[in-house]
C-alpha cells in the first residue's frame, strides 16, 4: 500500500502515539517498581521500538513483503538508536537541570519523545522502509 507524504506523516503520528503509550506505560511500571529514571527509560524504549516497527511496517509505509523482515528491522533499529540517543539526551538533560520529581520526569519524557520524533520519521521513510536491495 503506497501513501503520500501527508498520509505517512499522519499514520506515523498515530503509530508514534501508540509507541508513546507503550513507552510511557512501561516507564511508569519500571519507576513504580523502584528503578531509577535512567534505567527505567533505557528499558521502556525497546518495547516501543518493536511495537512501532510492526505498525509502521504494515500500516504507515505499507512495505510488508518488499524487504526481508530481519534486514528491514535492523535498518529500523539503527534509525531508532540514533533517535533514541537524541531522545535520551534531551530526557536526561531535563532531569539533570530540573531534578527528578515526577512532573519533571513526565516533561522530560514528552520533550525527548517530541525531539526524537522528527529524526525517527525521516529515518524510517528514507532508510528503514525504503526499498534498498
Image (tube, rainbow, N blue to C red):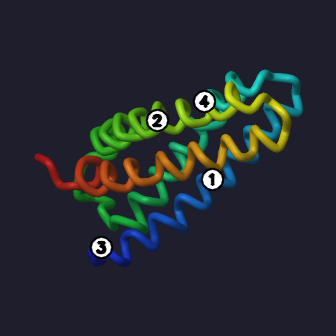
83 or 19, which lies in front? 83
Q: CA distance from mark 4 to mark 3?
A: 32 Å
Task: Report crowding for label 3: few under 14, some 14 to 19, many 20 or more residues within 10 A (C-alpha).
Answer: few
Q: CA distance from mark 2 to mark 1?
A: 16 Å
Query: As drawn, is 17 to the left or to the right of 81?
Result: right
- The earlier-in-sequence mark between 1 and 3 is 3
Q: Which residue is farthest front? A: 97
Circle 1 residue: 20
Query: As drawn, is 59 to the left or to the right of 64?
Result: right
Task: From the image, state whether disc 2 or disc 1 is nearer to you.
Answer: 2
Query: As drawn, is 75 to the left or to the right of 42?
Result: left
Circle 2 residue: 86
Q: Which residue is farthest left? A: 133
| Image coordinates for residue 101, horizontal then vertical, percent | 84, 34
Task: Report crowding for label 1: few under 14, some 14 to 19, many 20 or more residues within 10 A (C-alpha).
Answer: many
Number of the label disc, if any, that sits on residue 114: none
Circle 3 SS class: helix
- The earlier-in-sequence mark between 1 and 4 is 1
74 or 121, which lies in front? 121
| Image coordinates for residue 21, horizontal then vertical, percent | 68, 54
Circle 4 residue: 93
Amino acid at each position: 500500500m503506497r501513501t503520500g507524504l501527508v498520509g505517512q506523516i499522519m499514520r506515523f503520528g498515530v503509530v508514534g502515539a501508540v509507541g508513546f503509550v507503550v513507552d510511557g506505560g512501561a516507564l511508569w511500571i519500571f519507576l513504580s517498581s523502584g528503578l531509577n529514571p535512567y534505567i527505567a527509560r533505557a528499558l521502556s524504549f525497546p518495547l516501543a521500538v518493536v511495537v512501532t516497527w510492526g505498525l509502521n511496517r504494515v500500516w504507515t509505509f505499507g512495505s510488508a513483503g518488499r524487504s526481508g523482515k530481519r534486514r528491514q528491522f535492523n535498518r529500523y533499529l539503527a534509525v531508532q538508536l540514533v533517535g533514541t540517543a537524541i531522545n535520551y539526551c534531551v530526557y536526561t538533560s531535563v532531569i539533570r537541570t530540573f531534578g527528578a520529581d515526577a512532573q519533571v520526569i513526565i516533561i522530560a519524557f514528552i520533550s525527548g519523545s517530541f525531539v526524537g520524533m522528527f529524526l525517527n520519521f525521516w529515518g524510517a521513510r528514507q532508510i528503514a522502509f525504503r526499498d534498498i536491495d
